[in-house]
Image: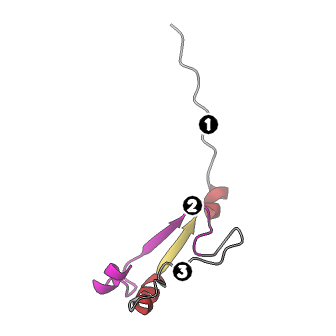
Amino acid sequence: MLTARRAGLTNGDYVFFHVDVFGESLQGGRGQGALLPWKRQDPEDQDAKEAYRILDPTALDSFRSQISPIPEPSAPDSL
């Protein structure tokens, strides 16, 4: 995200997705606090935090109701 910010891509003209398969990484889960990927205790923390604000977090849980189960493959035809 810092690279995108330095390239001027975090002004709202572009979309960045954070794919969170289990829906926990940025919100916190399993008794953990939210992860702060921008926080590294270095001088770039504030710039990184600003860059991460434009992310569109996407979690698998938000799509579960829209996904149809994949059918089991049928047995191959016998000759």
The amino acid type found where label 2 is placed reads Val
Residue 10 pos. (x, y %): 37, 84
- Residue positioned most to the left: 7
Q: Which residue is mark 2?
A: 21
Quick one: SS at disc 2?
loop
Spatial separation of the CA atoms under disc 3 and disc 2: 17 Å
Q: Earlier in the sequence, mark 1 or mark 3?
A: 3
Quick one: SS at disc 3?
loop
* Rendering quarter of residue 66: bottom right
Quick one: SS at disc 1?
loop
Check if residue 11 falls in the magenta segment: yes
- Residue positioned most to the front: 41
Q: Which residue is mark 1?
A: 71
Query: Closer to the observer: label 3 or label 2?
Result: 3
Spatial separation of the CA atoms under disc 1 and disc 2: 22 Å
Question: In the depicted view, which residue is nearer to us: 50 or 66?
Answer: 50
Q: Residues within 10 Å of mark 3 (few under 14, many from 20)?
A: few
Residue 32 pos. (x, y %): 67, 74
Kindly check if marks 1 and 2 are in contact, taking CB atoms under 8 A apart as contact. no
Q: Which residue is mark 3?
A: 36
Spatial separation of the CA atoms under disc 1 and disc 3: 38 Å
On screen, 18 above or below 4? above
